[in-house]
Every structure is written in structure tokens, then in C-alpha cells.
Image (cartoon, grey):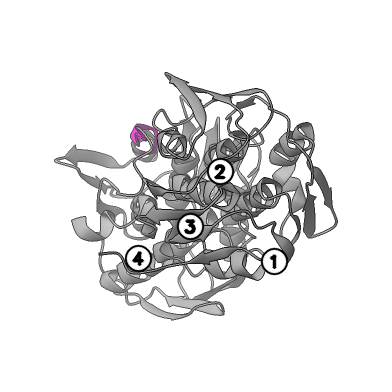
């Protein structure tokens, strides 16, 4: 990916559907007893991977990008996800909860995805066990089986987004009532609950730290549109600020962006919003700020990396504490090659703002790191070459086209 920096982003852009919702909702279609249709899915590689997995399990899938996906799960007899398919995306582990809820048995390998640090799934497995499943983990392969899933109280030791989603998927057709304590509250958890409820599930409390589920034997077909992508919205907001531009981001949910908007305002960026749009304007020097990543509604770890790129040219010293994933500061070593002044101590990055970044060859190591390098390239003088851009394709739909529509000089060429 080639970027010639220094062009302010100007104009309007529309946000795609949520990646984090999509990778939970698509496996959830396996719980349905009739065909169901999902709209507003992002056209990203993770979605294509899940389409292949559902088809391998026997489901009929009709996917028209940027239109709809219809899944008929009735022919699906499979309950095992291959090693290769499990490695294609982090969210392959949601097939555990979905297949366990559908067939009372599931086999999935430890997932692939981005190398951003340890992301244990012990809480997921603890939740399955609480519902009556026997769980075995051998050689990277996880097998879960139950004669019948029975509702229970599930207490998470730590807040876990993936664990909350996986236990929800397993519990919606379990016998009796399930209560999840210390549940995660992210917007895509609420969206998944709304999707399941539209099929006839009985879920209350999504968006709070206690979720109550009354098991239902039969779930009917539905048509459902996923919410806009919170992280794409934030990335575009940061890009507008980083280039001293003026951008209106349409089709978003402004209340999901409160933590980011507060930090941008603290930096001196102008942020205004309406019902489903956010306008970001910046034409002056940015001030340094401190950031500590937290679970929702705190500052999202997925926006820490793009935000850190913006802070490399802010006046003063910024301190970023990454509390979620210990390896989520690796991208700063790449941006340092562009002239950034960064020190990393354990999970803390200390960034001394510089006047300019300078383009050069850099490499993306994960999805949001790739987004951070795009931000840095848009800010930098000269041409930035980003290698391994396939990471970016995992979570951002048509990122080059969207940025070009706002005035960025960005393209992609085949490497040697």
C-alpha cells in the first residue's frame, strides 16, 4: 500500500457495517431453525472466511457483498471446524458456542488472527462447563460435548468480550435460565443479543454487566441489519484530525464514540455530531494527551493504535497505557522509523511529539496496527510503503477507496 502524505482529508464518507458484530452474528445463524438474512455486513476477508466455514459445515449460504447474506442452516450436519479454517480469523472460536448450542457438540482449533498478545479462552471454556458441557483441549484442538445444555449461573473472573458472546450463543437454546455475571458491555454484544432476540431468543440485560437468558427450543428466521462499525468510525475520525482535515462521517452511532471524541476534544480537535453523523475538523497544533485503554465504555484498545499514530506529532508528551493486550504497542517501532520519538516500558508508551513524520517502508503486523500505519502515512512527508496490507483487509472495507474519496493519495501495488 503506497501513501503520499500531507493532504488534508475533506468531504463526506459512509461507515460500513460492524466487523466485530458480523463475526459474531454470522456463526449465530447456525442456531436458527429457518433461513435468516443479514444486511449491512462489511465486505471484508473475515466475512468471506466465515462463509467458507458455514458452507463446509453444510449450511447453504447466499452472499451478495454490500447487499445481504442469507443463511439456511437446516442442512448443516457438520460440527468440526478444520485447523486451516480455524486459523483464518480470530473469531472462529465463536463456532464453539454456536455449534454447541446447535448440536451439543463442537470441535474447533485454537484460532488465528492478529498477534497482539495473549488472548486466553479459559473463561469461554469455564462458561461451557457451567452449562453442562465436557470440554477437552488437546494439541490446540478444543472439543466440547454435552448430552444436553442446561442453564446455569456463569461468573467470569475477568471481563471478556469473546467469552460473553460464546456463552450467549451456547445458552440461547439451553434448557432453563442462564445468568452471565461480569459480562462485557460492548455495542456488538448488544447487537448480537438484538439479532438473537429477533429470532425469538429471550435475552435481557445486554449492555450491562449481568445478562439473563431464558432458553428457547426453536428460533425462527429473521432479517437483521448489523450496526455501523465503531472502530472504522473512530479510525476515520482520527484520520481527519491527523491530516488537519474536515470530514463528515455518515451512518455511524455517535454515542459509541464518546471516549474517543472526548480525547480528540482534549487535543484541540473540533468534534460535533448529529443523529447518525460526526463531523471532525482540525486546523491547528494538537495537544498531547494521556490514554488508558479500558473495556467499554472506556477508551477502546482497538483505537489505541490509530490514536497513538496521531499523538506522535502532538505538542508535548503523551502517555499511553495498554491494559488489555500486552503486545499492542509493536506498531510504534515501525512509526519510529518514520521519525517518531517513542519509548516503551512494559505496557506503557511514552510519546514525545515531533514536528513531522517522514515516509518510508514499514510493515503491518496486525489489523489495527495496519490502520495506525495508514494514519502515519497520511500524516507523513513523502511516500510511505506499507507491507502486509492484508491485515488491514481483515477489518476495513474498501479503505483505499474511502480515503481517496476524501482526497488522500493512496494506492496498492503488487510487491515483489
- Residue depth check, mark 4 versus mark 2: number of the one nearer the observer: 2
**How many other residues sit within 10 Å of disc 3, few (<14), some (14-19) or many (≥20)?**
many
| Badge 4 vs badge 2, beta-carbon distance below 8 Å | no
Which residue occupies the foreground of this view, 247 or 8?
Answer: 8
**What is the magenta range?**
118-124
**Residue 307 pos. (x, y %):** 60, 39
| Badge 2 vs badge 3, beta-carbon distance below 8 Å | no
C-alpha distance separating marks 4 and 3: 12 Å
- First in sequence: mark 4 vs mark 3: 4
C-alpha distance separating marks 1 and 3: 17 Å
Residue carrying label 4:
49
Q: Quadrant of the C terminus?
A: bottom left
- First in sequence: mark 1 vs mark 4: 1
- First in sequence: mark 1 vs mark 3: 1
Dot label at residue 306: 2
Dot label at residue 395: 3
Residue shown at 20%/39% (left/top)? 137
Amino acid at each position: 500500500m503506497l501513501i503520499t502524505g500531507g493532504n488534508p482529508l475533506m468531504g463526506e464518507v459512509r461507515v460500513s457495517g460492524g466487523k466485530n458484530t458480523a463475526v459474531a452474528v454470522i456463526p449465530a445463524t447456525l442456531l436458527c431453525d429457518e433461513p435468516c438474512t443479514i444486511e449491512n455486513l462489511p465486505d471484508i476477508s473475515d466475512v468471506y472466511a466465515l462463509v467458507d466455514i458455514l458452507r463446509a459445515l453444510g449450511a447453504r449460504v447466499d452472499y451478495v457483498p454490500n447487499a445481504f447474506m442469507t443463511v439456511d442452516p437446516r442442512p448443516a450436519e457438520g460440527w468440526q471446524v478444520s485447523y486451516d479454517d480455524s486459523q483464518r480469523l480470530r473469531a472462529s472460536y465463536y463456532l464453539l458456542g454456536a455449534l454447541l448450542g446447535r448440536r451439543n457438540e463442537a470441535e474447533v482449533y485454537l484460532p488465528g488472527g492478529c498477534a497482539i498478545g495473549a488472548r486466553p479462552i479459559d473463561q469461554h471454556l469455564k462458561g461451557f462447563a457451567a452449562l453442562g458441557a465436557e470440554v477437552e483441549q488437546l494439541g490446540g484442538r478444543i472439543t466440547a460435548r454435552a448430552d444436553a445444555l442446561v442453564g446455569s449461573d456463569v461468573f467470569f473472573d475477568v471481563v471478556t468480550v469473546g467469552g460473553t458472546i460464546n456463552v450467549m450463543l451456547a445458552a440461547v437454546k439451553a434448557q432453563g435460565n442462564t445468568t452471565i455475571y461480569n459480562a462485557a458491555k460492548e455495542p456488538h454484544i448488544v447487537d448480537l443479543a438484538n439479532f438473537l432476540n429477533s429470532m425469538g431468543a429471550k435475552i435481557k440485560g445486554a449492555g450491562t454487566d449481568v445478562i439473563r437468558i431464558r432458553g428457547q427450543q426453536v428460533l425462527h428466521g429473521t432479517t437483521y441489519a448489523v450496526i455501523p462499525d465503531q472502530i472504522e468510525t473512530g479510525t476515520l475520525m482520527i484520520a481527519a484530525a491527523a491530516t488537519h482535515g474536515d470530514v463528515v462521517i455518515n451512518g455511524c452511532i455517535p454515542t459509541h464514540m464518546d471516549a474517543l471524541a472526548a480525547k480528540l476534544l482534549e487535543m484541540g480537535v473540533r468534534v460535533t455530531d448529529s443523529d447518525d453523523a460526526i463531523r471532525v475538523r482540525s486546523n491547528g497544533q494538537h495537544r498531547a494527551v494521556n490514554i488508558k485503554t479500558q473495556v467499554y465504555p472506556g477508551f477502546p484498545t482497538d483505537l489505541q493504535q490509530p490514536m497513538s499514530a496521531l499523538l506522535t506529532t502532538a505538542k508535548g508528551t503523551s502517555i499511553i497505557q495498554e491494559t488489555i493486550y500486552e503486545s499492542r504497542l509493536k506498531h510504534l517501532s515501525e512509526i519510529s522509523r518514520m521519525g517518531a520519538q517513542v519509548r516503551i516500558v512494559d505496557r506503557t508508551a511514552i510519546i514525545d511529539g515531533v514536528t513531522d513524520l517522514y515516509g518510508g517502508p514499514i510493515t503491518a503486523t496486525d489489523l489495527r496496527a495496519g490502520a495506525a500505519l495508514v494514519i502515519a502515512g497520511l500524516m507523513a512527508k513523502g511516500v510511505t510503503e506499507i507491507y502486509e496490507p492484508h491485515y488491514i483487509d481483515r477489518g476495513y472495507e474498501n479503505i483505499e477507496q474511502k480515503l481517496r474519496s476524501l482526497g488522500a493519495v493512496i494506492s496498492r501495488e503488487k510487491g515483489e
